[in-house]
Every structure is written in C-alpha cells, then in structure tokens.
Image (tube, rainbow, N blue to C red):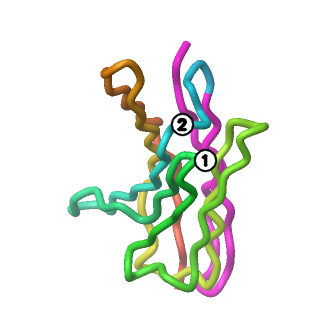
Amino acid sequence: QRQVVESGGGLVQAGGSLTLSCAASGITFSIAAIGWYRQAPGKQRELVARISSDAVNYADYADSVKGRFTISRDNAKNTVFLQMNSLKPEDTAVYYCNANYWTLGINYDYWGQGTQVTVSS
C-alpha cells in the first residue's frame, strides 16, 4: 500500500521543540520531493518546508519558520523529519506530509492524515 504517515505531534510550551516524522511506504521514496504543510483552524493549508529528491538535494522554507525549522531526509529509512525549534503559539496547526514524484510520465501525489501540533503560551 502506497502511503505516507506522520508522527511526532503533541503539546509543547512556547520556546520548546518537536520533531515530526513522515514515513513512506510503497513509493519510490528517493525520487520523491517531500513537503510539510500545516493548516490552522480557519486558515488555508500552507507550505512549511520541502526537500527535493535525493538527486537534486535542496530544501526551502516558509519565511515564518526560517531559522527555526529544519527538514531532512533519511532515504535508508524512507523517512523525512521536520525538526521544529523555538516553537510559537502561531505554529499551532495540523501538520501534513506530502510526497510527490514523477515516473514514466505519471505524477504520484500522496498525503498523510496529519499530526496535531499545539504550542501553548
């Protein structure tokens, strides 16, 4: 079964840290670009960070998280991590993982169910 599954969310105080994990199965992980998105109540889903396929090897971040969040991947474990430091109450949201890649002219796009991150002030 092709899927991505998020884990690692929880409740943390402002200034604290959390590490989210996105574990993929059944997909060609090494060529997939992986993105972390978040959606707060009443707001649109937004891109937080993304990392390219292993061959290209770049990462970019939303301005609101630059310098605080770090995305990384471990292809041996088919997992992408989002290290979140100096968390703020405005980081509270459901965080979603997305895997996207092309092979033989076909686009594959997978979303996880999300993991809740709550930052208390």
Predominant SS of the magenta segment: strand
Q: Which residue is mark 2?
A: 31
Place of residue 107 in the rendered image (x, y in percent of width and height, measured from the top left): 32, 27
Place of residue 64 in the rendered image (x, y in percent of width and height, measured from the top left): 40, 82
Place of residue 35 in the rendered image (x, y in percent of width and height, measured from the top left): 45, 52
Side of 17 where 5 appears, left or right: left
Report the residue that reaches farthest toward the right: 76
Report the residue that reaches farthest toward the top: 1
For residue 75, what is the image quadrant? top right
Q: Identity of the amino acid at label 1?
A: Asp
Q: Secondary structure at mark 1?
A: loop
Give the camera-side residue of 102 and 99: 102
Q: Identity of the amino acid at label 2?
A: Ile
Give the camera-side residue of 13 and 70: 70
Q: Which residue is mark 1?
A: 54
Q: CA distance from mark 1 to mark 2?
A: 6 Å
Place of residue 117 in the rendered image (x, y in percent of width and height, measured from the top left): 53, 61
User: Badge 1: few (under 14), some or many (20 or more) residues near its Cα, within 10 Å?
Assistant: some
Reply yes or no: does residue 16 show up in magenta.
yes
* Magenta residue span: 1-24
Side of 103 where 8 appears, left or right: right
Residue 85 against residue 41 in the figure, above or below? below
Q: In the rendered image, which quarter contains the N terminus?
A: top right
Name the residue at 61% across, 65% down.
11
Q: Are marks 1 and 2 in contact (CB under 8 Å)?
A: yes
